[in-house]
Image (cartoon, rainbow, N blue to C red):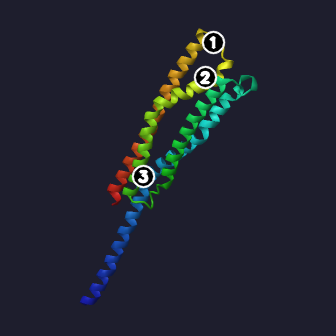
Amino acid sequence: MEYKELEVLWKQYDEKLNNLEKINSKLLKETLLKKPQKKLNRLKFTNLYGVISIPIIILIAQHPNFRTENIDWKFILGCVLTFVVILYLCIEQFRCYLILRKIDLSIDSAIQSLNKVVKLKTIANNFQKSVFFYYPIICLGITLISWNNFVFSTNTIIFLSVLFIVTYCLNIWGTTMHKGRINNFEKDIAELKEYTE
């Protein structure tokens, strides 16, 4: 075999190795993308579900109170307070959803994805802090809407107090869990960056 033939064979072999390396990198990236993509889809669903479900749940729960004989200053104030909080919650959930929609793990570099996740974490941090303010306001609003249907006794006051404390704690736990999911998603993207770049 002459030198030129060996050189041609070597170039062909080198091209095959390069193609094989590209295929391996692509397969590795696709495999590594599965876990963060599932988390991304779950976060999108959670935020979109929040935008839709919050107003619907409150409306269904309060619809028996929407009668003309219940309309007074307490009912109107309760509606205003509840509406303001629902509007805030829906806007924040929708902002998170829009950021999540912009994340494309197959196209974006890990740095681009991480920058978007940082924006998402900022909203989640603010959201977590604001639960201490908005939750008492929405509870007050719902209580004022239902005021005319309550028969206030010791049992009613105890029930409402326990309900408030339990749902308040659940709300704080829910925002903490959501923030934890975002942190886990960020870790998966960072791992993806280590293996693919």
Q: Nearer the viewer, residue 179 or 157?
A: 157
Q: Quadrant of residue 161?
A: top right
Tell me the tag on residue 93. Answer: none
Residue found 56% across the figure and 26% down from its top: 139
Asked if the residues shown at circle 1 and circle 3 are in contact, with their CB atoms under 8 angstroms apart, the answer is no
Q: Amino acid at mark 2?
A: Thr
The percent coordinates of residue 183 (x first, y second) are 39, 43
Q: Within 10 Å of the Cα at label 2, are there few (<14), some (14-19), or many (20+) other Cα atoms?
A: many
Q: Nearer the viewer, residue 76 or 183?
A: 76
Q: Within 10 Å of the Cα at label 3, are there few (<14), some (14-19), or many (20+) other Cα atoms?
A: some
Upstream in the sequence, badge 1 or badge 3? Answer: 3
Residue found 44% across the figure and 57% down from its top: 105
Q: Amino acid at mark 1?
A: Phe
Q: Which residue is denoted by mark 2 in the rendering?
A: 143
Asked if the residues shown at circle 3 and circle 2 are in contact, with their CB atoms under 8 angstroms apart, the answer is no
Q: Amino acid at mark 3?
A: Lys
The single residue placed furthest to the front in the displayed view is 73
The percent coordinates of residue 8 (x first, y second) are 31, 85
Image position of 181 with respect to 72: above or below: below
Q: Nearer the viewer, mark 3 or mark 2?
A: 2
Image position of 41 with respect to 107: above or below: above
Q: CA distance from mark 1 to mark 3?
A: 49 Å
Q: Which residue is denoted by mark 3 in the rendering?
A: 116
The percent coordinates of residue 23 (x first, y second) are 40, 67
Q: Is residue 1 visible?
A: no
Upstream in the sequence, badge 1 or badge 2? Answer: 2
Q: Quadrant of the N terminus?
A: bottom left
Q: Which residue is denoted by mark 1 in the rendering?
A: 152
